[in-house]
Image (cartoon, rainbow, N blue to C red):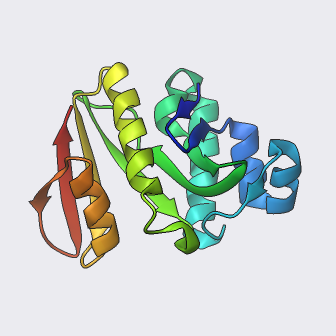
Amino acid sequence: MVIETNRLRIVPLDADMLETLSRDVKEFEREYDAKYDGEPINGELKSVLEYCAKAVRADEDNKVFLTMWLIELKGVVIGSIDFKGVPKDGATEIGYGLSKKYEGKGYMTESVKGMLKLAALLGVNRVFAETDQGNVKSEKVLERCGFDPISDGKLKKWGKNL
């Protein structure tokens, strides 16, 4: 399953590709046949990729909600997006990241909208997101995608009904 938007392809990774990306970007580029120009694969993102690989292996039926999806622009991976788990009571959370050099061009808004359409097709009726306090760029993405702020604090919580 691949999500196609006007300018982007959003592609889910299987467990093997998640592990490869967490371990060796050059090997990933050869196997995936695309240049990786997304966020640096370091501490937090490396841990998320490893966690996703284990989760996908443990529950292949819910892969769509457990894997990392890569955001591609003309054969170049520029970021990633994911659901943060299998929906509970019809709700799930979304997370995302983009290479700084691709910010401000609407790519993340386009990606979030594509994932929201997929979520609705899969029966999700509410999606949440969190932003660090003061992360105006991420807040603008969520606002453009129809999210409403729910709570304020170190992490700002957002929600959207589908």
Quadrant location of the C terminus? top left
Whether residue 93 is visible here, answered yes or no, is yes
Residue ID at (39%, 33%): 86
123 over 92 or under it: above or below: above
For the N terminus, give its image quadrant: top right
Give the number of marks.
0
Name the image quarter holding residue 24. Answer: bottom right
Q: Nearer the viewer, residue 106 or 36?
A: 106
**Residue drawn at (60%, 67%) of the image:** 39
Above or below: residue 99 compared with residue 29: below
Q: Quadrant of residue 56?
A: top right
Percent x, y of residue 106 = 42, 57
List x then y, in percent, for residue 135. 30, 75
Lateral position of residue 147 relative to residue 29, left or right = left
Could one spot residue 24 in this view of the protein? Answer: no
Residue at 34% across / 36% down in the picture? 116
Q: Position of residue 68 (x, y in %)?
A: 56, 45
Identify the residue shown where x is 51% and y is 30%. 64
Q: Picture coordinates of residue 121 (x, y %)?
A: 36, 20
Q: Residue furthest bottom?
A: 134
Q: Nearer the viewer, residue 161 or 74?
A: 74
